[in-house]
Image (spheres, rainbow, N blue to C red):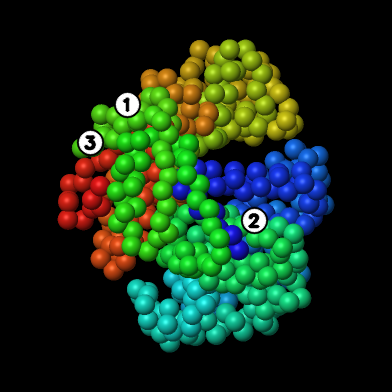
Amino acid sequence: MFRIFGPPGTGKTTTLLNMVDDALEQGVAPQQIAFLAFTRKAANEAKERAAKRFNLDPRSDLEFFRTLHSLALTMTAIQPEQIMQDSHYAELSRAMGVTLGAPNNTNFDEDLPSLATSTDPILGLINLARLRRVPLREQYNISTIDQDWNTVDYVDRCLTEYKQSMELYDFTDMLENFVKEGDICCPSFDLVFLDEAQDLSPLQWEIAHLLDGNAKRMYCAGDDDQAIYKWAGADVDHFINLPGGSETLTQSYRIPKSVHQVAEGVASRIHRRFPKVYEPKTEVGNVNRVDTIDYLDMSEGSWLILSQAGYQLQPVAQDLKSGGYLFNYRGHRSISQKISDAVNGWEQLRKGREISGEVAKKIYNFMSSKTRVTRGFKRLSGVEDTDFVTFDYLVSSQGLLATKEMIWSEAMDKLPDADRAYITALLRRGEKFNGDPRITASTIHAAKGGEADNVVLFTDLSPAADAEMRRNPDDIHRVFYVAVTRAKENLFIIEPEDLTCSYDL
């Protein structure tokens, strides 16, 4: 197994894809190439690139451009309808008399670390032990779960019995079954490419070694300095200690010199790492230390606002709304699509333009009966989502009482006051709030793989992270290394109020 170490911005995924291209050009059959990514999106992007360039059928020619879970699902002949769903966990909860939350990830085609977590701490603990390939009691003893051992053991036994009796499988069962049936179901390939190898769990590494044993050549790409999912079962030490050859990509196309200097200072604190040297891009960039985000002008460029813990971003989101900025927060736009569609749709109607029936229905949802629309016409009659309607049509046939003189805030009188104030602030700033936000407020973990012109980094540590810093400092060093290396031009470090509970940058 040959390793490709890809420091931030050096293009490790692109390197793998270029190797796929080279293999196809040299005549390797596409069906003999496996490209395994951590997300379905990444796997599909790789598939689409190869299919377009070489005029291949994505389904028949590139069927092994997948995630590890998807590969396991396919090769073990588990059917999608056999996968545990929320209803099954609810039924099991009732039978046990123990309330359980369902796993966070209900997409069987993803390898993301959320597979090791759950809205229920007991299920998360059970799954983590399985991914790490350790006894449940061992995982329990090092956990901070607020449950007695007897309850955890009881749930584990009931879960196993329930799945067996119902012939159901969870996400980890897919991987375990692949390992059990490896001699039978593990396919043979000429080439296997595995991306983000630093995030593999011990169970996933077993699959990787099975594939390696059945492949003529296997390449795995990753960066141990960006391994931030130990809490979810990832085993970066396995990646670091793999025998065989390796190559390090040495040119970053993202990180400017000033940011690179900060990043190298953080990386030097990591004790368990593969030594590597890479060069920044020629631009110097800027590193600034500021007291608050209040005085940062975020009107241009892309921005990532990062914190170690999610709750630390709540006041940031409020500040951004007050400032009239459009942004992403917790995976969602700061204003819902239905509201922005309705506001934009109304203004289009006022200008005499047509809008879709779908948008017209959204507008009506924010109008009061009798004052803005005749009672009985709250739902558009005979209008499909794909139909196009005009202002005059809505007045003549759909009971519209509002006039063209009314701006959106007057016409849609049922809009919540908070949304009304926020839209006003957006318009005052000149934000095109129906587009993709330039600003994202995110935890560092959720931002891994992303980048922005400007990165704003809060160095405050949650109490749990502060304790972890003392137990396993490497893990926290890696988290902040990931954060720093998202910046393409400028890094803004927010000086913490409490120096005793923060990361020193």
Query: Which residue sits at x=45%, y=58%?
Result: 224
Q: Earlier in the sequence, mark 2 or mark 1?
A: 2
**Label 3 amino acid?**
Val
Residue located beneath label 1 in the image: 297
Q: Earlier in the sequence, mark 3 or mark 2?
A: 2
The residues tagged by marks 1 and 3 sit, at their Cα atoms, a distance apart of: 13 Å
Which marked residue is nearer to the observer: mark 2 or mark 1?
A: 2
Q: Is residue 141 visible?
A: yes
Residue located beneath label 3 in the image: 290
Looking at the picture, tell me which residue is in the foreground, 2 or 13.
2
Residue 206 x/y as whole percent: 60, 72
Query: Which residue sits at x=58%, y=24%?
Result: 345
Q: Tell me the quadrant of the picture where the N terminus can be found.
A: bottom right
Looking at the rendered structure, the secondary structure element under dot 1 is loop
Looking at the picture, tell me which residue is in the foreground, 479 or 2.
2
Q: Do the CB atoms of the residues marked 3 and 2 lie less than 8 Å apart? A: no
**Label 1 amino acid?**
Asp
Q: Which mark is residue 193?
A: 2
